[in-house]
Amino acid sequence: MGGVTMTDVPPLEVTGLTVRFAGLTALDSVGFTVRPGTVHALIGPNGAGKSTCFNVLSGVVRAACGSVRFGDHELTGLPPHRIAGLGVARIFQNLALPPHTTVEDSLLLGRHRLTSAGFLSAGLRLPSAAREERRHRERVREIAAFVGLEKYLGHPAGSLPYGLQKLAELARALCMEPRLLLLDEPVAGMTAGERRRTAAVVAGVRDSLGISIVLVEHDMGVVMRLADAVTVLDFGRLIADGAPGDVQNDPAVVRAYLGERTDGTDGEETGDA
Ligand SMILES: Nc1ncnc2c1ncn2[C@@H]1O[C@H](COP(=O)(O)OP(=O)(O)OP(=O)(O)O)[C@@H](O)[C@H]1O
Ligand SMILES: [Mg+2]
């Protein structure tokens, strides 16, 4: 696929990020850097602060302090649509495509921020608008083929098996031509076959589009196979950061995942690793 090239993708630099909710410190001075064109996994037990981190990155939650720099832009303080406009696309943990809308139309809506002629609104059918619509439909077909959904374009999203619906969400995010993709548990609830297929698509996105991907995922098998770097959070604190192999064997990480906690609660499932 054309469009985005590696050189367009700046690093994402998170420093000293702190988020508080009424007495609870959900993120406590967390920092990490996502190198351009890499898959960076953000892992940790339930409640560690992973989704909160995504919420800050996408502008849904305000940080108490700290900074998120994406190239020349400071993201903290920007509203979600401005962050999206900088090429940061997010797939939510529990948000599906409209079930009765065809996959093609959902993907076309994903291109909305890139449209100038407003072809989605009925009204004046200028030749330039028709041309633009054709161009966007071509790109939608290209992206659908890339994730392996081409033959489902005319189907209502809700009629697809779960794994394909999740791939359609990924395709919709790709339709925004993002430079940074935030994936929150992309393989949760999938069968083993769907997991493999989705992981292969994510690897393909990195390798052929060169965009950066931040991946929140409990399935350690998928994390270890896909990630170029891993940041581990526990109770809002960064407890490890580095190459997947090193992080996996880090005693603090093993402790957090085995549930050896001072508060006596159980640890987190480690997926099908
Ligand atoms: N809007 C909110 N208001 C109050 N507390 C919140 C809010 N969002 C998250 N929290 C709390 O912040 C902490 C971190 O939650 P977060 O959802 O970021 O964890 P997570 O790492 O994504 O967990 P999971 O793996 O279960 O998705 C939790 O204790 C959670 O209850
Ligand atoms: Mg979460």
Image (spheres, grey):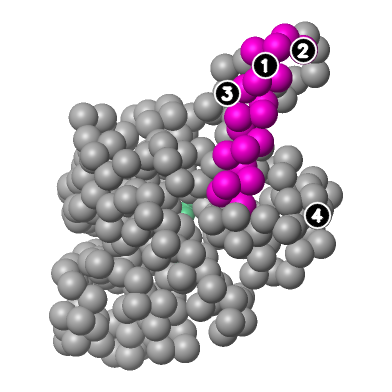
Which of 153 and 41 lies nearest the eye of the viewer?
153
Is residue 21 at least partly visible in the picture? no
Which of the two labelled residues, at mark 2 and mark 3, occupies the earlier sequence position? 3
Type of amino acid under label 1: Ala
Q: In this view, does 253 lie above or below 20?
A: below
Label 4 residue SS: loop
Locate residue 156 relative to residue 184 in the image: left or right.
Answer: right
| Residue at the spot 54% in from the left edge and 28% down from the top edge | 113
Residue 106's x, y, as percent? 69, 43
Cα–Cα span, label 4 and label 1: 25 Å
Q: Which region of the structure is painted magenta?
A: 125-144
Residue at numbered disc 4: 155
Which of the two labelled residues, at mark 2 and mark 4, occupies the earlier sequence position? 2
Label 3 residue SS: loop
Q: Nearer the viewer, mark 3 or mark 1?
A: 1
Residue at numbered disc 2: 125
Type of amino acid under label 4: His
Residue at numbered disc 1: 129
| Residue at the spot 23% in from the left edge and 76% down from the top edge | 244
Label 1 residue SS: helix
Q: Does residue 139 belong to the magenta stretch?
A: yes
